[in-house]
Amino acid sequence: MLRDITPIVFCTTANNWVEVPCAQTPNVSLTRKKQTGSDESLSMEHGMKQQNDFERISTLNILADCWPFFVELAICSKLRYEWLAREVRRLDATVLCLNEVSLSAIERIMADSFVRENYFVSEWGNSSTKESINRTIGKHGCFILSKVPFESLSAFEWSTPATQSNREVIVARVNLCGISTVLCATHSSHRQKQHQKREQQITELKQAVEADAKYGDAKAFFILGDLNVYSNSEDGMIVRNGMLDLWAETHFTGTAPFNDLDPGFTFDSQTNLMIPRYVPGHTRRMRLDRILMREHSLLRPHSKCTIWANESVDPQHPEVFPSDHYGLSIEVARAAAPTVGDPAAAAVLEQHAHEEPERHRRSLYSNTVSVGLHCGWLLGKAVGAI
């Protein structure tokens, strides 16, 4: 079920964020920073703008700040969100899709002058009153920042009992490289055993958006975000839904330099030092987050899909990372012909689909030791000894 929501942009006259109907967003002038690092002035009169050769699409689950105090001791949300506000500037994405965004996180991100000058956004609210314009944020939700105007903007709620979730998908239609493009900022159901529900969610989302008059004729279509793909065996849902996994398409192919077979873990307890601090004893490495593009879209990868937000936020706090997830980013360009998947990448996903789901069970002894050590660390953190 799709419901229309209103784009929001910063108004210098009012010195505040204001609602702008989709039909009026092309008339809003922003100063847009090129991916090359220089500035360009965008004249958006009647939707006319200079088109880049490529556009950057990025996603990150930022890890919400609405957890109990003992979790907050480990994840240091204020420090992380200060980093995120700076990183949005450095990343310089054309469209940035975020998951687990609370109203307090929105306030911090949108206080940054770069965001105010460069982005349309999907939500604005007050963390004190818990009120938001588009009602897309409960404890946390999905959030889109876009340098290009929203031609359409909606919130999608999974409708069937088998797929219902308290997190709405934010669906946006924009123009990238001259191609009408739909992006769905998505946060699927978690827990490994819910793999069938996740596939149903992706299928229902794709079918609903493609059937909607505002989005159905778009020439490129993306589903991106924390899809909670716990096991490689879930890769079959990507193939069955006619989607391309852009990490696989730029790392699992048979052609250099896109054949490095980098596994692309976006949840990695071996390299992200913050994960064991709030999930004691966790040892898993997973590709939870994905950027999926519908096959035969008129956009193509312009560069490798890359990982970002994968280092500590501050050398003085090496155990504090931006999130428990790493982000994904890719540059896309206009395709000369409809994009088809690489056979080698498809073969890897098909092979994964026939594998048994990975099982990670830990003994009672191991869990007890991990929790005991963690409680000691939290106590030291609470009294300032760490």
Image: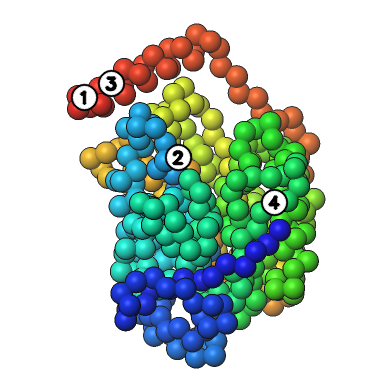
**340 left or right of 261?**
right
Q: Secondary structure at mark 2?
A: loop
Vertical side of 164 occupied by 67: above or below = above
Relative image position of residue 62 (x, y in whole percent): 44, 48
> Mark 2 or 1, which is nearer the eye?
1
Relative image position of residue 367 (x, y in whole percent): 49, 15
Relative image position of residue 188 (x, y in whole percent): 63, 46
Q: Badges 1 and 4: C-beta atoms under 8 Å apart?
A: no
Q: Secondary structure at mark 3?
A: helix
The residue located at (60%, 46%) in the rendering is 166
Kindly report the distance in space between the C-alpha atoms of the residues bearing marks 3 and 2.
21 Å
Q: State which quarter of the image contains the C terminus.
A: top left
Outermost residue toward the top in this view: 365
> Mark 3 or 2, which is nearer the eye?
3
Q: Badges 3 and 1: C-beta atoms under 8 Å apart?
A: yes
- Quarter where residue 334 is shown: bottom right
Which residue is under mark 4? 158
Bin the neighbour count of mark 4 within 10 Å (Cα to Cα): few under 14, some 14-19, many 20 and up: many
Which residue is under mark 3? 379
Nearest to N terminus: mark 4 or mark 3:
4
Bin the neighbour count of mark 1 within 10 Å (Cα to Cα): few under 14, some 14-19, many 20 and up: few
Relative image position of residue 208 (x, y in whole percent): 75, 60
The residue located at (38%, 73%) in the rendering is 10
**246 left or right of 1?**
left
Q: What kind of residue is marked 4? A: Trp
Which residue is under mark 2? 324
- Quarter where residue 219 is shown: bottom right
Q: What kind of residue is marked 1? A: Val
Kindly report the distance in space between the C-alpha atoms of the residues bearing marks 2 and 1.
24 Å
Which residue is under mark 1? 383
Confirm whether residue 257 shows in the render: no
Q: What kind of residue is marked 2? A: Asp
